[in-house]
Each structure stands twice: as C-alpha cells, then as structure tokens.
Amino acid sequence: MNQDQPNITQKVSGSNHAGIFAGLAAGLVLALAGDAFLIVRSNDLKAQVAQVKDDDQAQISKLSDTSTNLLEQQRQQLAALSDDVSGKYDTANSALRRARMDAQKSSAKLAAQLEEQQKAVGDEIGQLKDATTTATAKLNDDVSGVKTDVGSVRTDLSATRTDLDKTGAELKRAVGDMGVMSGLIATNSKDLQALRDLGERNYFEFDLEKGAMTKKVGNVTLTLKKSDPKHNRYTIAVLADDKMVEKRDKTINEPVQLYTASSKQPYEIVVNQVKKDGVVGYLATPKVTVASR
C-alpha cells in the first residue's frame, strides 16, 4: 500500500466530520431560530390573549356598570311608580270613604223626606176619603132629588102626551123635501100650541108678505118669492149661515127642510096658509145646538 493513503483517508475523514459538524451546526441554528420564532410567536399570542382578556374584562366591567345603572334606573322608576300608585290608591280610597259617608248621609236624608211625604200623603188620603164620603152622601141626596125630578118630568110628559092624544088628533109626521122624516106637524094654531107644550123643538110663527122686505124668523131670514093660493103652492128664499137657498113650488103643510151649522137635525118650515100676496106658517128648530168652530 502507498504510504500516502492514510493521509488521504484521514483528510477525507476530517472533511466528512467537518461537513457533519457544519450540517449539525446549521440544523442547530435552524432549530434555535425556529425555537426563537416559536417563542416570539408564543409571546405574541400570549400578549394578544392577555389583550383580549383585558378587553373582555373591560367590556364585562362596562356591561356590568351599564346593567347596574339600568337596573338602578328601573328600580327608581318602579319605586316612583309604586309611590304614585300608592298615592292614587290612598286618594281613591279616601274619596271612596267620603262618597260612602255622603251616600249614607243622603240616604238618611231621603229616608226622612220619604217618611214625611208618606205621612203627608197619608193625611191627604184621609182627607180625600172624608171628602169622598161627604161628596158621595151629597151625590146620593142629589141623585134622589134628580130621580124625583125625573119622575115628575115623566109624569108631566105622560100628561102632555095624554093631552096630545085628546086635543092633537090632527098632528102627524111627514117626509120633508130633503127626504128626512119630519117631527110632528101642526096645521093650525091649536096644534102648534100642543107642540109647544110637548117641548121637543123651538117654534117661531111668521106671516110673510110677497114683495115686502125680508123677515128675520128665529136665526134665519125668509123672503117670499111667489104664492099661488089656487093650488096652495109657494116659493120662498131662506138665508142661513150666510148662504141663500131657494125652495121652489112647495105645498101647504109640507115640511121644508134645511141644515145649518148649529144643528145636526134639520130646520123645518111649515106653511099652513097660502094667501094671494103672502103665506102664514112657522119655523121649527132643534132644542140641541152644536157649538160653532
């Protein structure tokens, strides 16, 4: 073997060891650099975490203060509301007590007034009963008197009818010129007196001349327009209620009828005698009249 070979081997071995050392050194440096980076990064993260914790703590503290303030405000508002409600309740309760007291006073006053009114009404009822008793007794006496008077009137009426039966045989009824059954008709002065005694109607005699001025008979006005003694006929004008009505060609003893505003029954004109220039007769009017409107 060559003598120079160990040297070469030693040189090569020394070179390898130097490379390994250099690689290890580089690796160590990289490892240290990585550790340093991780340490720095870790410190940064720790700092960030600490900052976040501080921020969170500050936020929590701020929220806590805000919540505390809000709760305090709500507590104060609730306290104020409670005081207000309590005051209103006290006021309402006091007003209710006063209202009850006033109602009790009013009730007592009304009860007293009602008692007085009931007493007054009782007194009035008693007086009314006494007055009614007196009035009833007086009415009974009056009714008895009226019954006596009615009996007398009936007796007089019966006597009058008996007289009519004896003296008024000529009295009769007839249908008037308006188609209405007339009352009893008198043909002479004796019959007319009998009708007056009967008292059923009012009677007004007239003697009317032709060509003369109008004549007031009762509450109507008569004017003779024509007379025919040969045939016992006549024509007459009647003024009643400011209306003129002409009754033409009427016969003797014929009921000439007309209505007026003062009566529901007809007026009747009866002529008993027709002369050359006049007529003689009577006007019969109802006893009962209607009040003018």
Image (spheres, rainbow, N blue to C red):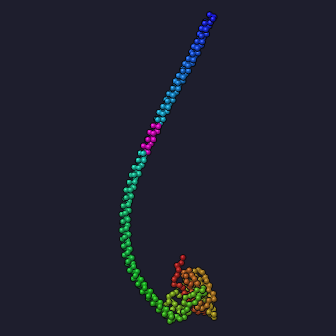
- Residue farthest toward the top in the current orientation of the protein: 3
Please give left or right for residue 162 compared with residue 137 in the image: right
Q: Is residue 108 left or right of residue 192?
A: left
Q: Is residue 270 magenta?
A: no
Q: Position of residue 79 (x, y in %)?
A: 42, 43
Is residue 206 visible to the viewer in this orientation of the structure?
no
User: Above or below — where is 279 with respect to 2?
Assistant: below
Total marks shown come to 0
Residue 77 colored magenta?
yes
The residue at the point 48 percent across, 93 percent down is 162
Q: Would you say residue 158 is visible in this rendering?
A: yes
Q: Position of residue 177 (x, y in %)?
A: 60, 87
> Residue at horizontal 51%, vertical 28%?
49
What residue sits 50% from the left and 88% below the top?
199
When the figure is inspected, residue 178 is found, relative to residue 103, above or below; the finding is below
Magenta stretch in the rendered image: 67-81
Work out whether residue 192 or residue 109 is closer to the camera in this orientation and state it.
109
Q: Specify the quadrant that holds the C terminus.
A: bottom right
Q: Main secondary structure of the magenta part?
A: helix
Viewer-proximal residue, 248 or 24? Answer: 24
Q: Nearer the viewer, residue 281 or 186?
A: 186
Q: Residue, x 56% and y 15% (percent of image)?
A: 25
Give percent across and percent down for residue 283.
55, 87
Indicate the position of residue 113 as horizontal and vertical percent values: 37, 64
